[in-house]
């Protein structure tokens, strides 16, 4: 049996990080105090202090003199497609408290070649496109993203072509209409420069550094249900979870 050699303070920080990403600990919530962490995880107070330091260094927590250390995510956390799929499957909600999305496009369009390949769209064919900008509670753009679906879903799920949020999220709407359930996601990401379109949507200068992610939601058979791309402005952390 393999032993977890990760230092205890990093294990505890990872546990709190998962709660922050999942929205169980929300922006402005107090983190467990050093004493409470020490008692809950059977660690020393010095180790518990390191937990707070790690989360502060990652921009996920902040401390003010004379006040508790609190969760801080509105300007620093970038939730990935995997995070949002997990939230949709477990809570029925894609967005964290305070976040909201503005749908900027909902139509049938010719997809990029990489999307067409994954969806099996014929050359020159069309797929359902939904583009959105996600905002934090203080109205700051968190990311802009585009989701693509097989063209035949336009008839099965007409709401996909309506430029408005789908209550419960697109995964639930597709499952209700077709029985296909997205159960896993595959993500790839890189650093890039903001295109003029991305810059306008995110309120940043063209050419600014951005995090570009591509994701595929797959069903139990491993077949793509949704293919997407998202762009996040600089200064936001993508948190990787492992078990």
Image (cartoon, rainbow, N blue to C red):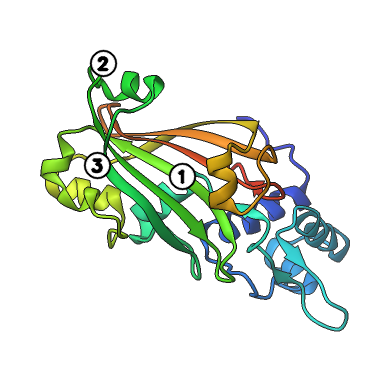
**Residue 16 position in % (x across, y down):** 64, 59
**Label 3, on which residue?**
181
Viewer-nearest of discs 2 and 1? 2
Q: CA distance from mark 2 to mark 3?
A: 27 Å
Judge by depth and name the residue closer to the eye, 103 or 189.
103
Q: Residue at x 81, y 54 (%)?
A: 57
Question: Is 84 located above or below residue 136 in the figure?
Answer: above
Q: Secondary structure at mark 1?
A: strand
**Residue 216 position in % (x across, y down):** 39, 32
Q: Quadrant of the N terminus?
A: top right
Residue 6 numbered mark, or none:
none
Q: Tag 3: Cα neighbours inside 10 Å, few (<14), some, or many (≥20)?
A: some
Residue farthest along the top direction in this orientation? 123
Asked where in the image residue 35 lies, by quadrant, the reply is bottom right
Judge by depth and name the residue closer to the eye, 203 or 66.
203
Q: Quadrant of the C terminus?
A: top right
Horizontal arrangement in the rendering, residue 102 relative to residue 62 (left or right)? left
Point out the tag, 2 or 3, that comes first from the N-terminus: 2
Q: Residue at x 78, y 58 (%)?
A: 51
Point out the tag, 2 or 1, that comes first from the N-terminus: 2
Judge by depth and name the residue closer to the eye, 138 or 184.
138
**Label 1, on which residue?**
145
**Label 2, on which residue?**
123
Question: Is 75 located above or below residue 63 in the figure?
Answer: above
Q: Tag 2: Cα neighbours inside 10 Å, few (<14), some, or many (≥20)?
A: few
Q: Secondary structure at mark 3?
A: loop
């Amino acid at each position: 049996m393999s032993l977890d050699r990760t230092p205890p303070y990093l294990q505890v920080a990872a546990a709190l990080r998962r709660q922050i990403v999942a929205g169980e600990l929300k922006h402005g919530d107090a983190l467990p105090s050093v004493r409470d962490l020490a008692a809950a995880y059977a660690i020393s107070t010095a180790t518990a202090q390191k937990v707070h330091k790690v989360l502060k260094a990652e921009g996920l927590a902040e401390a003010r003199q004379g006040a508790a250390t609190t969760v801080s995510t509105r300007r620093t956390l970038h939730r990935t497609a995997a995070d949002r799929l997990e939230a949709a499957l477990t809570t029925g909600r894609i967005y964290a408290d305070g976040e909201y999305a503005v749908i900027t496009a909902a139509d049938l369009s010719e997809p990029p070649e990489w999307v067409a390949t994954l969806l099996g769209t014929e050359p020159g064919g069309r797929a359902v496109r939904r583009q959105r900008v996600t905002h934090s509670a203080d109205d700051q753009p968190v990311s802009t993203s585009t989701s693509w679906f097989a063209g035949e879903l336009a008839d099965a799920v007409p709401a996909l072509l309506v430029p408005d949020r789908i209550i419960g999220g697109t995964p639930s709407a597709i499952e209700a209409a077709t029985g296909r359930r997205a159960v896993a996601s595959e993500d790839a990401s890189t650093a890039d420069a903001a295109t003029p379109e991305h810059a306008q949507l995110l309120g940043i200068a063209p050419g600014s550094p951005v995090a570009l992610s591509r994701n595929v939601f797959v069903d139990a058979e491993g077949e793509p249900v949704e293919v997407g791309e998202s762009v996040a402005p600089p200064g936001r952390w993508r948190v990787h979870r492992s078990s």
